[in-house]
Image (cartoon, rainbow, N blue to C red):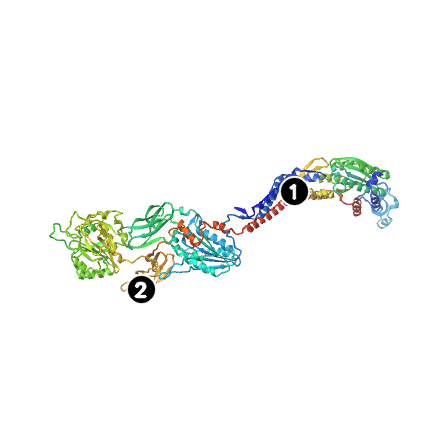
Amino acid sequence: MIEFRHAGALVWLVVAVAPVVIYLLLRRRKREVPWGASYLLRLTLATRRKASVWKQMVVLAVRVLVLVLAASLVARPYRQNPRPRSLAPRMPERPVHRVVLVDDSLSMSVSVGADSRLNRLRSALGALLLSERPGDTITLIRLVPERPRPGASGRRLLAAPFTTFAGRLSRREVREIVSGISLREGVIDLEGPLIAALSRFAATPGAERELYVLSDFPREIGTTLGRLEWFRSSRGGICVVPVNMSAAGESLRSSVSVRDVRIGSDLLLAGVPTLVYVDVQNFSDVKATTRLRVELGGQVAAEQVVSLQPDERKRVALPVVFSRAGVEALEVRADGELIVLDAGLARCVEVRHGPAVWLYADEADPREELPMTESEFLVRAIACEPRLLGLEPIGVRELAMPIPAEVDVVLLAGPRVITPKMGEYLTSFVRRGGGLVVAMSPRVDIAFYNDNLGPLLPAHLIGPARKEVDPQSYDSARQEPADGASELFAEFATDRSGELEEVRFYNHVLLEDADRLEGVVFRLTNGDPLLVHRACGRGHVYLWTSSIGASWSSLAVRQSFIPLIVRMINAAMAGRGFPRNLRPGESFVCEWTGKGTAALVGPDGQQRELQPVRGPEKPFVIASGLAERGLYELRDATRRVGAFAVIGQFAEPDLRTLDDDGQKALAATLGHSIFEDWPAAVRALGPSDSAPELGLVVLLVICALYLFETWFVRYL
Amino acid sequence: MTARSNLLTAEAAARAKELEFFARTRVEGFLKGQNWSRRKGASTEFLQHRAYMPGDDLRRLDWRVFARTDRLVTREYEEFTNLDAVLALDTSGSMGYAGEAMSKIEFARHCAAMLAYLLNLQNDRFGFAALSARVTDFLAPSNGKRHLAELFRRMVSAAPAGETDMGACGAELLRRAGRKSVFVVFSDCFQEPAGLCRGLGMLRQQGHDVLVLHVFDPSETDLVFPGFTLFRDLETGQLDGADPMELREAYRDVCRAHSQALKDGLNSYGVEFAPLPVTAEWDVALAELLMRRR
């Protein structure tokens, strides 16, 4: 929209009617002259008369238009809402030093149609850069701090890098600078850039100081505003202009973000349905519906539609069956994510077919009316599905010697005695990565367990809770919340299936310090631990304080019996695999089964060589310094040998601008409220003197019209 | 003599005495004069040899040729005679146009009067014809002061009116012309060039000498009027409205093309064409024209 600085001068528009008036007067005051050469005149008119009327109109219109433009030129026209590219704030009389804090976080890539926050930022920055004059200075500072390198400690105080440009910049230079802004993942940090801005201002003491903050002001910074109190007293004399780069109404678009993916173990059993727990949150002010997908090898393995209220976070369980042995990568995606990262939320798991499980239980007591071992139910149940577990009942002889490395888990089904030698071999087995599941029974001699399995057990055993088993007196189980390995057992939680709650536990073994015990997976309704986990060396030990047979509980006759046992074995054998989902900075270690040197291919496609390290039995590869999230692959010359993932949450899940309280706090800190967009900021600051530019255009148009009129009248 | 005093000034009469007017073609006269005659005569200017014919004057036999070739040939000499000139004045309405200078017909009258005076001085015979759509007045060629006065009177009385049709006028002049004469036409030539050339070309094709003096006002070749103007045709009274600013360039082009067409058309018939702008001094302009013509 075009407006005029001297609108009063538009009265000169009346002169535009002069050609019309003159034309009408001339038409009205027809002059009659005697003419001898009428013969020649008529010859001329014969060729001109047809076109004369509309040509007169054209000439008249052009002359009127020329006068209108001339009058508007006097009124100094300028564009009220020019394109942001040409929209720059008014320049002060003195040289100015402008420091621009540029939000280069990934949230700036959010777009509405073809227009993204980054595009708006580039337009605003381009206008600022183009308005630079000789003697002016402009400094650009990025808001996202550099990602700390793995292993580096301490916090960077000054934001870096910053770039300073002095004097007038050509359009080509501006284009290069603006297009050179790239986005990085990370939460913006205002403190460091503000300190850097003050230091840059100090370098130009005589100049006007203007500080522009071009950002979408994400909600994450709301928690850091308290650290900016110092800026209130330091900002004297600085014109602070915070401008919101996000479009109006963006918070009303549904924005769903997958916050976490949990499986429970990096080593899973093939053929066993496994629940993938996906935490998804709605970061918008409207109800959102999204479709969650778990992709396995590029194929959708499971999907589910989820509806979320504003700001609601849900944990969704998606059942996935891993049927193929080996290392599998799965990725979780959700429709409606405003920012889709290439890395996605990837996880890597190792899948194995039926693990080798030794089952040790006492022989059946022939004096009983129905002689049956504690493992009787388990053996018979597993016999129906032999592929699930390679369950092998053993005797005391097998445990009286070192346990072979091929065995993954040893399950002690409440034998009465654990000899010192058995304890020694079991300890060695667990420390080397084996899994041990210890269940109780009425026959167990607590002293043997405490003495010979003490280093492995999560807690000291006290003794049976009840002297006698009373069918009318029993407890139920509930899952202990918040445990590291709880996802494997989450399906048995009370609020999910309730199946375990239906099991009656008539008796169990009491543990010392049961209330403060760590690693409790299930507790009984009376608060006593039912299943307790303890990591020992590379291996894992699970203590089942009741019986897995029918002696102390009804578990063996419930449908959840086999799934629970399988989960316990799966959890216990975790030490047989290597951690495949690492935090940034953690090192990956695994056996090297490939040939020659290993090649590590990162999520960005870059490849680096890894030299295998010779171990006592097998070579290993060690990959360290891994900061980039995503899937990594280990390859030898011919094939993929292994894979793992570096996981981490997306730094900016909430793409909304600060709420009202946050904006007020930020405005109090910066000394100015956030402008809703760049044109609003420029309007408030006073637009640059764009009239000459538009005036030049008008002048050129006038010249062009004059030339046209001359040509038109003369040659047409 | 009143008409003479109006049409011919003393300066013009004095200037006319220094001038000569010749026909460019052979004319037929009956008195000795300055113009080439169509007949052979006895002057000193040798013309040609011709085979002797019985009855030829023996005094004209070329004895030297006879002695050399044994053939009888006679010598012929040029005959100079006076001429008959008809001063044809275009009296159509357009000749009444007067710009800043005198009107075209007035200018033409002065020139014709000066030329008649010159012809009278040369003992040539001169007549008068008033032309418009037809020959409205015709005075047969003669000479003498009385005839000159009559010519002046008729010229003055010929008022501009009517349209121009040189084609019809040319045919009528051809009928009225007796001997091979010289026709001096004073006209603004505002007519279709083809018809005008055809009419005057007929005279030329019949052996008459024709001289067209294009009397024009330079203001007529340019539309200098500001604003919309109604042009009243002096010949028909018809009104033509036009914006001179808009038409000026095109009008100039038409004028140039018309003039060029006249020139080319008349030259193609062997008719002499000369412009006479009314803004010049009429006696000077005519004198220069006749001097150039010599």
Instruction: Name, please, the residue furthest toward the left.
Output: A367
> Badge 1, how many Cα within 10 Å: few under 14, some, many 20+?
some
Left or right placement of residue A525 versus residue A49 in this view? left
Does residue A376 sit above or below B187 in this rendering?
A: below
Crowd band around label 2 with a 10 angstrom C-alpha radius: few (<14), some (14–19), many (20+): some
Q: Chain of mark 1?
A: B
Foreground residue, B116 or A20?
A20
Distance Cα–Cα, label 2 vs label 1: 98 Å
- Amino acid, disc 1: Glu
Q: Which residue is mark 2?
A: A613
Residue under the image location 25 percent in, 48 percent down: A494
Give residue B53's mark: none
Q: Farthest residue to the front: give it.
A: A233
Q: What is the secondary structure assignment of the residue under circle 2?
A: strand
* Residue A531, image x, y percentages: 23, 53
User: For the view shown, which residue lies furthest in the right direction?
Assistant: B59
Pointer 1 residue: B246
Q: Nearer the viewer, mark 2 or mark 1?
A: 1
Q: Position of residue A474 (x, y in %)?
A: 18, 48
Amino acid, disc 2? Val
Chain containing the residue with disc 2: A
Q: Is residue A630 above or below residue B251?
A: below
Helix, strand or loop at disc 1?
Answer: helix
